[in-house]
Structures are given as structure tokens and as C-alpha cells.
Image: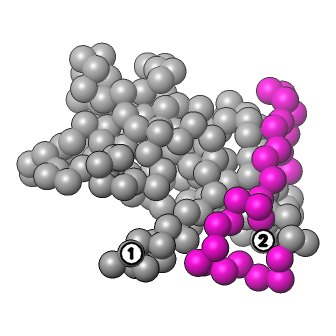
Amino acid sequence: MILSDRSIREAIESGRLGVQPYDPSLIQPASLDVRLDNKFLVFRNTKRPFIDVKEPADDLMEMIEVAPNEPMYLHPREFILASTVERVRLPSDLVARLEGRSSLGRLGIVIHSTAGFIDPCFDGNVTLEISNMASMPVTLYPGMRIGQLSFVQMTTPAERPYGPARGSKYGGQTLPTASRLYLDFQNERRS
């Protein structure tokens, strides 16, 4: 069951669903619009000859901060990480789905490659995996509405919710966060 605008508003106002900063005008009929923050992780292609998924990727990316009214230029086939202005905290019985705005999709902008699902008990700013599929550069501006979150009620609260107790890789993130896939391989070695 997807939460309606009224249910989203009630969940936020009661504190059951955390959204900071909260702007009621961002609530849509069945979703909450999220805005683009001003910090971006971009690849430095000269650091290594390839990406090894068993190694940390932090040194492959550089953080760029854009002034409030300054555009971020996203070139064709370019991929960057960004995050939402909003910090989201989900209870143990809700999941969220991140989707792009159709107006941006019609310009060739995709805001997530595969990470559109947000687990119960996630707490942090959502990292966006932004790609330009168009043949021309596109400008993105800090503070613009970049996507939307819909919230889905689970049948029961999660027995093993996302968080530190479960070894979450991205819980508590406040900035765009590079891949931590290498941690999967470290855990395999311990088994």
C-alpha cells in the first residue's frame, strides 16, 4: 500500500517519518519531492586503469561543492553522485522508492542506476546516482526538485531492519557516498 499525501503529511507531522528540512509544499498526491544538494562526487579517471569492486572507490572520486545559484554541468554519458537536501528517517514498517522527475527524464537525466529502494530504518540523506543519457550537457542547480520518494507500508515491521546492528554500509550518510561494495568481499573472507 502506497501512502497518500494525507498519510505522508500525518506520518511526518507525528514524527513517525523523519524528513529534515520539512517543506509541506513538496508533498505530492502520493509522494514527497526531494531536492538536490550542492555537493557532488565526480570520477577522476586518471587515478587507476579500472575499477576493482574488491577495493575501496573513495580515491577514485572527488567532492565538488557548487554555490547556491551556480549550475553543475552534467555532460553526455557522465555519471556523478549527489545527495538530497532532505535527510530521511524511515520507521521499521515503511520502505521508500526513489524515482526521477519525468520533466528531467525527458531531458535525459536519470537519478538512480539501481539504488531506488530505501530499506526500513534507513536514516540519512539519499545518495543519487545521476547520469546524463542525452547528447547535450544539462545544467543541474542546487535546491532544485530532483526526484520523489513514495512510501510503501510493509505487512509487518522488519525483524532485521537496516542499520548499524545489521552492518549497514550507508546508514547515517550526510554527503554523497561512494560505493562500499568492497565491504561485501571483506565479510566473505571472514566467513
Q: Find residue 190 and name its label.
A: 1
Type of the residue with mark 1: Arg
Task: Report the span colored magenta.
Answer: 48-73
- What's the residue at 25%, 37% (across, down)? 91
Image quarter of residue 122: top left
Q: Marks 1 and 2, Cα distance to the nearest angstrom?
A: 38 Å
- Screen quadrant of the C terminus: bottom left
Describe the element under mark 2 as helix, strand or loop.
Answer: loop
**Residue placed farthest to the right in the image?**
46
**Residue of label 2:** 77
Q: Is residue 9 left or right of residue 79?
A: left
Q: Position of residue 66 (x, y in %)?
A: 83, 36
Crowdedness near tag 2: few (<14), some (14–19) or many (≥20) residues, C-alpha within 10 Å: few
Q: Position of residue 65 (x, y in %)?
A: 81, 38
Q: Find residue 5 and name its label.
A: none
Crowdedness near tag 1: few (<14), some (14–19) or many (≥20) residues, C-alpha within 10 Å: few
Q: Nearer the viewer, residue 23 or 54?
A: 54
Q: Nearer the viewer, mark 1 or mark 2?
A: 1
Q: Position of residue 176 (x, y in %)?
A: 63, 47
Q: Main secondary structure of the magenta part?
A: loop
Q: Is residue 142 left or right of residue 182?
A: right
